[in-house]
């Protein structure tokens, strides 16, 4: 499913806190003075005004785009197995936390194992997984006239890509997947607080640190339909693009896989059918911990 959104559609879903963070301005539009009072300063207000002007200017001439697909799926160990009818469509190996104290989470935990899945398949939202990608066209940035305008456009495009996923996820929960069709009306603040059922971990983030998963998602979604192309490292172009998975389980939550031991790396490489050295290129370097000899 391909969806297009006007700037006006996704603009309300922008998380401005992260926009200001990208500019090195903690606290969002309001600064906090030494005495703990919140104030507006000239730099933040000027940045806000410039951002609003650019959004006004591009509204009507630029759209964001998203892809979404829903598949029956079950867990097998730490793998997510996607099904097409009675046939296996694809296998998405996941990584499990290696913390010393339980629970040691893995995204596959938020799906039913094969035996339970067979008993209730088709009737249970927790027997499915969503795949998504979203992007803001590079023309949003290419038209910038100077370095400041380019950085403003890039940071806004990044936020618009995330805002597109926020709106997409809302529509998926209530309509396209419909597992939360009775969801109460949530404010934008509630959405940013993730006060809803389900999660949407993105590739490259703490619970999905392997950038090469984008190649698997691309095979399933065909991201070029919305103009996304992958580099050799699994990065998406345009830069303002997001991809990942959606889970409906009420206990699903975000977590950090953390540091990856050599034993887990070897097991993961076996399940991914890739060489461990190749996987090191795709995983965040700080996450791969060599065991002491």
Image (cartoon, rainbow, N blue to C red):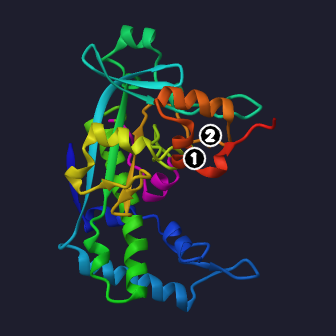
Disc 1 marks which residue?
206
Residue, x 63% and y 30% (percent of image)?
Answer: 264
Which contiguous range is marked in magenta? 181-194
Question: Is the residue 263 above or below the residue 64 in the image?
Answer: above
Residue sitting nearer the eye, 274 or 48: 274
Choose top left, top right, bottom left or bottom right for residue 115: top left
Residue, x 50% and y 48% (percent of image)?
Answer: 194
The disc at residue 189 is none
Helix, strand, or loop for circle 2? loop
Label 2: few (<14), some or many (≥20) within 10 Å? Answer: many
Q: From the top left corner, tell me how far across and down residue 2 is, in percent.
A: 20, 47
Helix, strand, or loop for circle 1? loop
Query: Do residues under tags 2 and 1 come within 8 Å of each other at their CB atoms?
Result: yes
Label 1: few (<14), some or many (≥20) within 10 Å? Answer: some
Q: From the top left corner, tell me how far across and down residue 292 is, in percent.
A: 81, 38
Disc 2 marks which residue?
257
Residue 249 visible, this angle: no
- Residue 237 is left or right of residue 85, and the answer is right
Q: From the top left corner, tell me how far across and down residue 12 is, in percent.
A: 36, 65
Residue sitting nearer the eye, 65 or 52: 65
Q: From the top left corner, tell me how far across and down residue 182 is, in percent.
A: 35, 36
């Amino acid at each position: 499913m391909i969806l297009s959104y006007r700037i006006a559609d996704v603009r309300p879903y922008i998380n401005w806190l992260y926009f200001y963070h990208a500019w090195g301005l903690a606290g969002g539009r309001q600064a906090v003075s030494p005495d703990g009072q919140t104030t507006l300063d000239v730099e933040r207000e000027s940045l806000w005004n410039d951002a609003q002007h650019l959004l006004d200017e591009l509204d009507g001439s630029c759209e964001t785009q998203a892809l979404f697909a829903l598949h029956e799926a079950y867990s097998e160990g730490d793998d997510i197995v996607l099904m097409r009818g009675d046939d296996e469509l694809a296998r998405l190996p996941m990584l499990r936390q290696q913390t010393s104290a339980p629970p040691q989470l893995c995204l596959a935990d938020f799906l039913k194992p094969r035996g339970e899945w067979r008993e209730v398949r088709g009737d249970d939202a927790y027997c499915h997984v969503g795949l998504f990608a979203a992007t803001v066209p590079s023309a949003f940035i290419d038209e910038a006239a100077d370095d400041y305008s380019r950085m403003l456009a890039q940071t806004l495009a990044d936020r618009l890509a995330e805002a597109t996923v926020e709106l997409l996820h809302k529509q998926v929960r209530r309509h396209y997947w419909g597992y939360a069709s009775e969801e109460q009306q949530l404010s934008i603040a509630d959405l940013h607080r993730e006060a809803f059922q389900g999660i949407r971990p993105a590739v490259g983030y703490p619970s999905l640190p392997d950038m090469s998963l984008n190649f698997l998602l691309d095979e399933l979604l065909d991201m070029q339909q919305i103009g996304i192309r992958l580099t050799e490292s699994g990065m998406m172009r345009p830069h303002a693009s997001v991809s990942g998975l959606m889970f409906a389980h009420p206990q699903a939550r975000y977590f950090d896989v953390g540091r990856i031991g050599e034993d887990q790396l070897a097991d993961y490489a076996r399940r991914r059918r890739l060489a461990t050295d190749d996987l090191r290129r795709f995983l965040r370097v700080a996450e791969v911990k060599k065991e002491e000899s």
